[in-house]
Image (spheres, grey):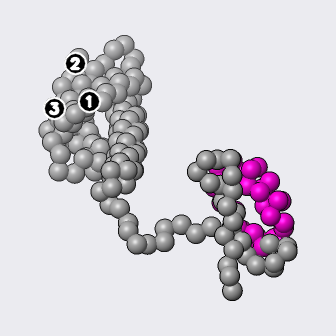
Amino acid sequence: MNIVITGKELKATEAIKDYVHKKLERIEKYFEGEEINVTVKIKSEKNSQIAEMQVNIKTYSIRAVTETKDLYASIDKDIDILEGQIRKIKTKKEKMNKEDSIKLKESNAANGASTVEDEIIKTLYYDIKPITVEDAKLKLEEKTGNIFLTFVNVETGKVNVIFKLKDSNNYGIVEPEA
């Protein structure tokens, strides 16, 4: 981490420099291994002590300016502000990466890049009640998205499947022989 501390109408003493270095360690933990440039400007205006910090990392720059009666309090507040901004940026970046990976998975699935073959990938459970063939046909008409319906035929006591034919006007029935 490269830190430049300058003072305007206020001398940057060793104690202030050490304090700033110590406090900036909180920022450094978010960017392990990355080049960080920090510019700290301290100044005194009337009864106020102003600390201005700018952190530059590869792709972005964040800044905080605080004015209090105590310089050390201004530095602390700046660090808190910078840390909050960094957490916000990191969270946003992680969220974007997560969304990108989900989109990538979906596009791979759509393109057939990771197709699963010869596997049962979905199982549906539902109750089968004894009904007539006509009632089964009416139920199938109610459920517009379905193309078939499994039911127990009241007349035969066997499990049947009624399905819509390709002409969408007629129906077929599958009934076991045994």
The residue range painted magenta reads: 125-152
Q: CA distance from mark 2 to mark 1?
A: 22 Å
Count of labels shown?
3
SS assignment at label 3: strand
Classify mark 1: residues with Cα within 10 Å, few (<14), some (14-19) or many (20+).
Answer: few
Residue highlighted by disc 2: 8
**In the image shown, does 78 or 168 lie closer to the viewer?**
168
Verify whether residue 144 appears in magenta.
yes
Residue highlighted by disc 3: 4
Question: Is residue 101 in view?
Answer: no
Taking the spot 84% from the left edge, 66% from the top edge, the residue there is 132
**In the image shown, does 28 or 76 lie closer to the viewer?**
28
Which of pointers 2 and 1 lies earlier in the amino acid sequence? 2
Percent coordinates x, y for residue 103 in the rendering: 38, 46
Q: Which mark is residue 61?
A: 1
Percent coordinates x, y for residue 35 in the rendering: 15, 42
Q: CA distance from mark 2 to mark 3?
A: 13 Å
Which of pointers 1 and 3 lies earlier in the amino acid sequence? 3
